[in-house]
């Protein structure tokens, strides 16, 4: 029996998707719930699983094509290996013995890898011509992670790809010697297109300004050093800087409600809750999952949630629910080495906090020069509803709370 594989219902506000990567080939055996193909939308990556055991009989829409909900993208022949499918394969062998023989041999390891690895890992393995057996996994149960593949590639121990640079080097250098210059045109991914649209929208519709300050993180650093062992033992998660910044931000938002508000037409909407967006990087671009009711979360719960969002972003496992909403955002360019930047608003939010790298710098404290771990902070805000006074005082409040972490506990 043949079954049509269709594009599932797309998330709200998403009208179409792009066929990103097929993880099975026509003729491959599949098991129920095996991921057949990844569909890329402008917000999340969707997996299309097999609805039954069988054989992927036909792929109707190739990678790179645009599809809509309900479109038929493949045909699945149900059954244990699709008995009817195996007979033609066997009878075809005498006609072209060399062609069918290698196909099953190469398909088998790919199928085994597909069953246990995330879409991001499978994609990297395919792109670099690697097998999961070549790399030691550090994940749960020896599962291969994206970081394992990246580390393997960085080590240079990649026999499958070792030959790839050889032809590319002369092909680039030869035109250069004769005066030629190469160009490569690559379509933007859907999420990159969406990011571009939103960034332009923010600059065109908001009266955006940025104010800066710097914070001495000596107190937070000492507190982390003192309790990080007990914290991790008690909660099973490391005590990072982000939980302090989230807690300080929420306290500042409570004191300056306009910074947590948004514009809707000619109305100002004050939000009586604190859904904090945390910008994280993913293979598809920057995404901003939401910590909902962050004011009710403990330090450990904040750290756990951020860690889970980061991993799910790397594995392309974030859902529309994870990315929808938010009243204020925090972005940390410091993890990439940024010392100072002007973050762009995430509409319809009215403000965003930018964290940066921590530097040991000489500072004057009580009349003496001392070396302190300093970070520049940036607050970009919509001047249509937030005045400079509120923006400066809001950022100063975050600075004061972080420089004396006891204030976060006492809320003073």
Image (cartoon, grey):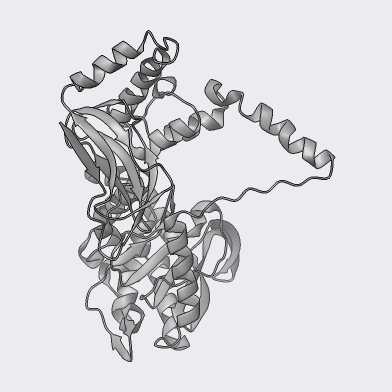
Q: Is residue 182 above or below residue 12?
A: above
Q: x and y percent of residue 399 in the render?
A: 44, 71
Residue 181 left/right relative to 98: right
Q: Does residue 406 show up?
A: no
Apparent side of residue 190 relative to residue 183 in the rendered image (left or right)? left
Can residue 123 be seen here? The reply is yes
- Where residue 290 appears, as percent x and y from the top left, is 29, 62
Q: Measuring from the top left, give residue 158's x and y in whole percent.
A: 54, 24
Q: Quadrant of residue 279?
A: bottom left
- Residue at 40%, 72% (x, y): give it: 398
In the depicted view, which residue is nearer to us: 320 or 223? 320
Q: Quadrant of the N terminus?
A: top left
Where 39 falls versus 277 (above or below)? above
**Residue 220 sits in which quadrant?**
bottom left
Q: Which residue of the protein is positioned furthest toward the bottom in this rendering?
A: 266
Nearer to me, 53 or 363: 53
Q: Is residue 144 above or below residue 289?
A: above
Instruction: Return the residue found at the far front.
Output: 95
Residue at 31% in and 62% down: 15
- Residue 410 coordinates in the image, percent (x, y): 26, 70
Pick out the residue farthest to the right: 178
Q: Residue at x 55, y 28 (%)?
A: 155
Q: Residue at x 22, y 73 (%)?
A: 273
Looking at the picture, tell me which residue is in the foreground, 170 or 65: 65
Seen from the viewer's position, the closer of residues 67 and 84 is: 84
Q: Determine whether, in the image, residue 300 is placed left or right of residue 226.
A: left
Q: How many marks?
A: 0
Q: Quadrant of the C terminus?
A: bottom left
């Amino acid at each position: 029996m043949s079954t049509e594989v269709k594009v599932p219902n797309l998330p709200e506000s998403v009208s179409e998707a792009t066929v990103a990567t097929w993880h099975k080939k026509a003729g491959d055996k599949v098991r129920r719930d095996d991921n057949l193909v990844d569909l890329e939308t402008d917000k999340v990556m969707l997996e299309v699983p097999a609805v039954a055991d069988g054989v992927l009989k036909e792929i109707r829409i190739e990678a790179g094509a645009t599809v809509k909900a309900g479109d038929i993208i493949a045909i699945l022949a149900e059954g244990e290996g699709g008995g009817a499918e195996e007979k033609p394969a066997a009878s075809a062998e005498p006609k072209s013995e060399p062609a069918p023989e290698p196909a099953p041999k190469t398909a088998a390891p790919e199928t085994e890898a597909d069953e246990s690895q995330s879409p991001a890992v499978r994609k990297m393995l395919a792109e670099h011509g690697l097998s999961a057996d070549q790399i030691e996994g550090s994940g749960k149960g020896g599962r291969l992670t994206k970081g394992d593949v990246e580390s393997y590639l960085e080590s240079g121990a990649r026999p499958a790809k070792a030959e790839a640079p050889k032809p590319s080097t002369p092909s680039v250098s030869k035109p250069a010697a004769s005066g030629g210059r190469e160009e490569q045109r690559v379509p933007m991914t859907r999420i990159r297109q969406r990011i571009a649209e939103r960034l332009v929208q923010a600059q065109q519709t908001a009266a955006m300004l940025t104010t800066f300050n710097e914070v001495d993180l000596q107190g937070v650093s000492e507190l982390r050093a003192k309790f990080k062992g007990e914290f991790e033992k008690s909660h099973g998660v490391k005590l990072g800087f982000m939980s302090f910044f989230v807690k300080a931000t929420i306290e500042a938002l409570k004191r300056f409600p306009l910074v947590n508000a948004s514009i809707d037409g000619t109305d100002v909407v004050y939000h009586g809750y604190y859904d904090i967006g945390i910008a994280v990087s993913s293979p598809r671009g920057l995404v901003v999952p939401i910590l909902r009711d962050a004011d009710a979360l403990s330090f450990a719960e904040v750290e756990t949630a951020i860690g889970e969002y980061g991993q799910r972003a790397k594995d392309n496992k974030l859902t529309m629910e994870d990315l929808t909403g938010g009243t204020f955002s925090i972005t940390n360019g410091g993890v990439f080495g940024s010392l100072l930047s002007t973050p762009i608003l995430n509409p319809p939010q009215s403000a965003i906090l930018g964290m940066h790298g921590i530097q040991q710098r000489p500072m004057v404290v009580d009349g003496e020069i001392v070396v302190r771990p300093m970070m520049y902070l940036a607050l970009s805000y919509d001047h249509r509803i937030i005045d400079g006074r509120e923006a400066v005082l809001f950022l100063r409040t975050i600075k004061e709370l972080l420089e004396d972490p006891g204030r976060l506990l006492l809320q003073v």
